[in-house]
Image (cartoon, grey):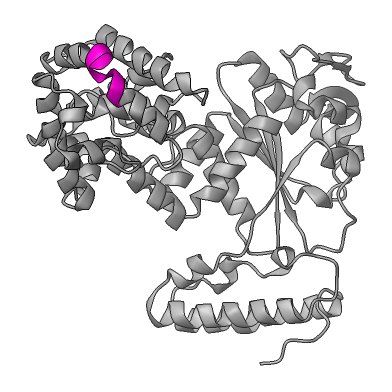
């Protein structure tokens, strides 16, 4: 979807938008007339220095009372002339802004407190609605930058928060066609807010947490009860890692991107099982029959193949997804390569190490740009617990059953599905029979999602109830579920 169309989905005619259009012109007029802040109307001065003013909310980053007094006392000597020059120009004067920014930082830092970068940027943004973003915190600015990347925001190589703010606002100005500058200027934050709301509605917090863990540890296992969408989520994680996950994107569009990455060789998918071994996964001797004669050649397995591709293409990220990772004999499958999985042992790091493969005799290491995502069913008692050597090298993230997704089906279907979901939840909570957490046992939301009420009843009778019966037989719950 075009950025302009997304903007049109958000209304700026709320309390914040009205306040912004009311006060920002007043601040600019004060700057043009070089009026000291001590001479401003009390209402305007209060709004300007408030923790939640018309530019943004900074509950955790606003100026302290002592810092506000320093700003008022220093206004004429330090800020007045610079502000006058800034608001008198139609262009963005970076050097003037930097000078003013540094003066504010210097004065507010005199209290011995931390540097108030976000609050300082909000100070500057109040006088330059078309030049600086209403997103002011460093973390939020960078998140907004990556959100806008798929829409074509020019590459930003790094610099100050001030420069990034101008970079983002300039792009928004070029994309949004409104003639109302105040209406347009609030859209950087509104767009960011739209994305955050969408993430909360669609369970993106889990995906974002997974991405952070994956970037830190390189290896991640999604664990949870059946039906929580572990395998489903892996594709979304990959798409988010490529910074291509957007708010208007359907599941089909996510899968289209994911499949393209698979076809381009960036992603490999495999499932562990009890007969899988090192020769299948890393490399092994494979028989070749020609004219009745049998010979053997060394052939790479799926793990070595993707490691080789990632090594040869260090500019891009590569992903290996291992479904049911706990169903395989991990020691037998990874062999000596378990040690190489650690982030600091990866290729290109100071502590990088390599191993000599037993068949090809090649020196082998795991590249730093390969990410491994595994899934694990926490209720599967047909196999033992996951190998401790592997456990130390992976982060574990529990994927929970999500009642909100069940309820979002709406109407009678959502109501009935939610009723079933709650019944199961309450029974498992009331009659536990193991040391497993409730989140590791609760049947996932996919069991309660259906096209219609008839389909839901079929799922309930032939999928949910038999699974609960298995829970009881396997000793996971202490009492059978009876309707």
> Which of the two residues, 275 or 17, is positioned nearer the viewer here?
17
Q: Quadrant of residue 443?
A: bottom right
Q: Is residue 187 above or below residue 128?
A: below
Q: Quadrant of residue 306?
A: top right
Magenta span covers which residues?
72-79
> Which of the two residues, 346 or 31, is positioned nearer the viewer here?
31
Q: Is residue 188 left or right of residue 112?
A: left
Q: Is residue 389 above or below residue 396?
A: above
The count of marks equals 0
Q: Is residue 73 magenta?
A: yes
Residue 96, given in percent of the width and then of the height, sits at: 25, 9
Residue 128, given in percent of the width and then of the height, sits at: 20, 24
Main SS class of the magenta portion in the image: helix
> Which of the two residues, 29 or 234, is positioned nearer the viewer here?
29
Residue shown at 73% from the left, 87% from the top: 481
Q: Is residue 389 above or below residue 406?
A: above
Q: Is residue 117 something one can see in this rendering?
A: yes
Q: Quadrant of the N terminus?
A: top left
Q: Is residue 330 left or right of residue 173?
A: right
């Amino acid at each position: 979807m075009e950025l302009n169309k997304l903007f049109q989905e958000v209304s700026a005619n709320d309390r914040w938008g009205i306040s912004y259009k009311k006060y920002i012109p007043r601040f600019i007029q004060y700057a043009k007339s070089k009026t000291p802040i001590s001479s401003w109307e009390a209402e305007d001065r209060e709004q300007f220095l408030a923790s939640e003013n018309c530019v943004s909310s900074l509950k955790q980053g606003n100026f302290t009372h002592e810092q506000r007094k320093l700003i008022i006392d220093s206004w004429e000597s330090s800020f007045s002339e610079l502000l006058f020059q800034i608001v008198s120009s139609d262009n963005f004067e970076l050097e003037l802004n930097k000078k003013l920014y540094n003066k504010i930082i210097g004065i507010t830092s005199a209290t011995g407190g931390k540097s108030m970068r976000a609050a300082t940027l909000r100070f500057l943004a109040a006088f330059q609605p078309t030049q600086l973003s209403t997103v002011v915190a460093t973390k939020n600015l960078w998140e907004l930058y990556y959100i806008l990347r798929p829409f074509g925001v020019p590459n930003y190589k790094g610099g100050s928060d001030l420069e990034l703010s101008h970079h983002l606002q300039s792009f928004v100005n070029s994309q949004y066609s409104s003639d109302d500058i105040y209406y347009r200027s609030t859209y950087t934050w509104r767009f960011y807010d739209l994305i955050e709301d969408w993430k909360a509605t669609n369970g993106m917090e889990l995906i974002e947490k997974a991405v952070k863990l994956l970037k830190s540890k390189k290896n991640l296992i999604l664990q949870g009860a059946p039906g929580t969408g572990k395998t489903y989520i892996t594709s979304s994680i990959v798409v988010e890692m490529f910074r291509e996950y957007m708010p208007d994107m359907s599941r089909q569009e996510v899968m289209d991107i994911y499949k393209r990455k698979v076809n381009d060789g960036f992603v490999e998918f495999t499932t562990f099982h009890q007969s899988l071994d090192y020769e299948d996964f890393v490399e092994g001797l494979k028989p070749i029959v020609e004219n009745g004669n049998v010979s053997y050649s060394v052939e790479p397995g799926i793990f070595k193949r993707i490691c080789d591709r990632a090594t040869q293409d260090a500019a891009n990220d590569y992903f290996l997804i291992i479904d049911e990772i706990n169903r395989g004999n991990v020691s037998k499958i990874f062999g000596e390569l378990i040690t190489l999985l650690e982030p600091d042992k990866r290729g290109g790091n100071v502590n990088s190490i390599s191993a000599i493969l037993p068949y090809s005799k090649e020196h082998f290491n795991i590249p730093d740009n390969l990410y491994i995502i595994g899934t694990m069913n926490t209720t599967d008692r047909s196999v033992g617990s996951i190998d401790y050597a592997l456990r130390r090298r992976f982060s574990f993230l529990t994927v929970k059953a999500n009642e909100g997704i069940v309820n979002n089906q709406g109407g009678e279907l959502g109501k009935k599905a939610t009723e079933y979901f709650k019944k199961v939840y309450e029974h498992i909570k009331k009659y536990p029979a193991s040391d497993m957490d409730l989140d590791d046992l609760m049947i996932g939301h996919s069991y309660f999602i259906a096209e219609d009420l008839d389909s839901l009843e079929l799922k309930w009778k032939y999928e949910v109830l038999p699974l609960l019966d298995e829970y009881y037989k396997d000793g996971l719950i202490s009492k059978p579920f009876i309707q």
